[in-house]
Image (spheres, rainbow, N blue to C red):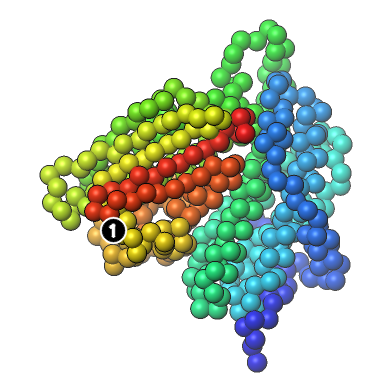
Amino acid sequence: MLKLASAFRPTHSAWNNGNRRHISKSHYDETVVYKYASQKIRPVSLGQLLKYRRLPLSAENILDSVSYSQAELPVRLAKRVISFHRLPFIVGTNPHIARVYSQYYEAFDRLHAFPSITELDAEWGFTRALERQTQLLVDVIPAISQGFLECKQYMPSEERTSFINELIRSRIGLRVIGEQHVALSYQFRNEQRAARPTPASRGDSVDDVWVGAIHTRLLPARMLEQCAQMVQNMCEMHYTTSPGYYIDGDVDETISYIPSHFEYITCELLKNAFRATVELSNRSNRSAHPPIQITITKGEGYVGVRIRDQGGGISKSNMRNVFEYSWSSMQESGESADDSGSGSSMAGMSMQTNLALQQGIGGPIAGLGFGLPMARLYAEYFGGSLDIVSMEGYGCDVFLKLRSIEGS
């Protein structure tokens, strides 16, 4: 008889170039995974990320970076593998969840097998493998969401939320470490090919603002302008209308941050503001959409962003749900990604396909319920915060606080 509470102990299988290949599970395999998983992870050090700011990069810098990646990534991947072992058996055997498990095991299996790297040729081989494995884990979130949607009756909500939170936090850390090293490795080789002059003889180049994947003089006003224009276009596409927006405050302030993180967070927040504004206008027959106000403030080592809309706010009864996975105001209003008139372009797509689009910047305008909780995790990862103040019947103020990676 099947016991729902028994732990998931799968046979490992992995993916290679889209074709499934079998990795036999042995006592040795499990012993190695548990050996790595028992080690402590080192939180992503802000100093580590900006350790090589003084350009040009040297071979010693790259070998030091790969040493950190080699030491840290297998431990983090092993801990994710073990977390799947602890799932109830019937949850772990769900095909979507089992596939993600296989992807994490393959990433661990490939990366931990590299011997200690002391030469640039070996580092380049590791970097290319790391780049491939990072890309293979891109679709983790939509697959996990589909799996837990199908298995939600077999796990309490609190346990599902805890598992997803830890998976996403771990995924952020893995990508930060991996993408930072990959970016540094490419940057080093580009510098070598260009035979760049010494720092003393160089002017202030555009390239000099990058340290791997980190932009050391990111201009939030410019990023917000780009994100707002993109969301405005999405809104036009889905609703055939869109509110305006304006950006005020400390518009010349800069921050050291990872642009893709900033872009993901702010696009999710703007999508909510634009959608709510249009939908309230449609319900209330407003003659014109009130504009979205985007205000930037600077603080000691951080930048604040407030996004203010007049989209009707969130009811008190729903405020406790806004950071829960798979909850959406569209669901609350009886709409879905498939039957909403405003979201007709998403009709015929599975939830997994829609979520895959949503986790990219150009995804659907709303309806899947992963945007806000993921945005908050991204904001909190480097010590920031994300808070919502709702005035029911009027609108919302969303407060985003991001610490400068350099100033933290």
| Quadrant location, the C terminus | top right
Name the residue at 56% across, 36% down. 403
x, y (%) of residue 372? 44, 53
Relative horizontal placement of residue 319, taking residue 382 as reference (left or right): left
Q: Is residue 267 above or below residue 301?
A: below
The reply, left or right, for residue 88 in relation to residue 111 is left
Graded by Cα atoms within 10 Å as few (under 14), some (14 to 19) or many (20 or more), the crowding at tag 1 reads some
Tell me where residue 45 sits by quadrant: top right
Q: Residue furthest bottom?
A: 1
Quadrant of the snapshot with the N terminus: bottom right
Residue 296 shows in the view: yes
Q: Which residue is pictured at 55% across the width and 78% down the height?
A: 154
Secondary structure under tag 1 reads helix
Which amino acid, mark 1?
Answer: Ser
Q: Is residue 142 above or below residue 302?
A: below
| Residue pointed to by mark 1 | 344
**In the image, is residue 346 above or below residue 51?**
below
Q: Is residue 199 left or right of residue 374?
A: right
Q: Residue at x 72, y 30 (%)?
A: 51
Residue 356 image position (x, y, % from top left): 48, 56
| Residue at image point 85% right, 71% down | 27
Give the percent coordinates (x, y) of residue 290: 22, 40
Above or below — where is 280 with respect to 325? Answer: above
